[in-house]
Image: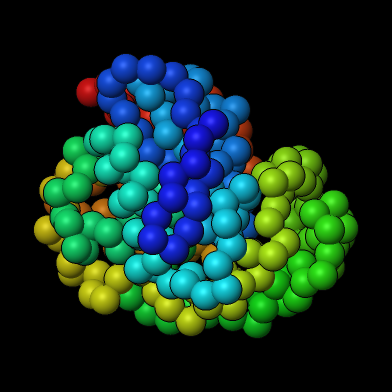
Amino acid sequence: MAQLVTEDVALHVEVDGEGTPVSILAHGLMNSCRELAALTPLVPGTKVRFCFRGHGHSSSPERGYRFADFARDVSAVADEYEATIGFGTSLGAGAIGHLLTKVPDRFDKLIFLLPAGLDQPFQYKQRMLHTAGLLDGRSTEEAIEAITSDPGRAQGYLEYPWLRDFDRQNLQELNTVGVPRAIREVIEDWPLEDREQMRLVTAPTLLICREGDEIHPAEIGRILAGIMPNSELLLYRDGGEMYQAIPEIVARVRDFVLS
């Protein structure tokens, strides 16, 4: 474990594996560097996992949670560890995408898991503001209980019973100070000024999406696959099929990294 201090934040970093290639993993909103920690040992090379500002064990400035700020976190860690592969989930995909609009050739390969936005305002602000309110003033365990007991998640847990435990696991490092700040600021922003900017990104790109996810619309994957000149889209029918396909996805990512 290490800490990378930048001009406005201290970023918690964890590294597993060794050698090349070096991949940076940028997690989703509310999660931490532990998001994919159970799977990264299955992928070759060095994997650099870090917590975004306001998340996990990183510091939580009062402000500075727009995509440009998250992109600076990615850039700082990627440069420090000389990462050549960028792997982003949801928020992390958006942060990497924002970085690529400034430096299109920053990475040799890219993996976007459930990208959540392009160049349009976020549609579900009230839902996310409600979530932020569930965290305010609570301990981590109290906040996890509030989130996983929220009626808005009940239908998802009925359809996919495994999802509650999955959510609880991802939220174990929940930062109840920084995450509400991040939510309230980032929902007023979007990753790209113009989606056409991604046409300049020529690195091989693997896009992993699923149908039926309002926060991470499959249409974003389709759009990026049509714009990015060297991309491939893995598209699943729903969350259940995607969950069952995890071994297949890990194998595909491993082959992609090694190719």
Residue displayed at 76% across by 75% down: 133
On the rendered structure, is 31 left or right of 109? right
Question: Residue 126 appears in which quarter of the rendering?
Answer: bottom right
Colour style of the rendered protein structure: rainbow
Q: Position of residue 183 (x, y in %)?
A: 59, 71
Residue 33 falls in image quadrant: top right
* Vertical comparison of 157 with 255: above or below: below
* Nearest the eye: 26 or 1: 1
Q: Is residue 33 visible?
A: yes
In the drawing, does residue 226 fall left or right of residue 51?
A: left
Judge from the rendering whether residue 123 lies leftward or rightward of residue 105; answer left or right: right
For the N terminus, the image quarter is top right
Report whether residue 95 is seen.
Answer: no
| Residue 62 spot, x, y in % from top left | 57, 73
Question: The C terminus lies in which quarter of the figure?
Answer: top left
Q: Is residue 256 above or below residue 160?
A: above
Q: Position of residue 32 (x, y in %)?
A: 59, 47
Which residue shows up at 70% across the image and 53% down it? 174
Q: Residue 112 at what x, y percent from top left? A: 38, 48
Residue at 44% in and 45% down: 4
The residue under the point 44% across, 19% down is 17
Tally of numbered discs: 0
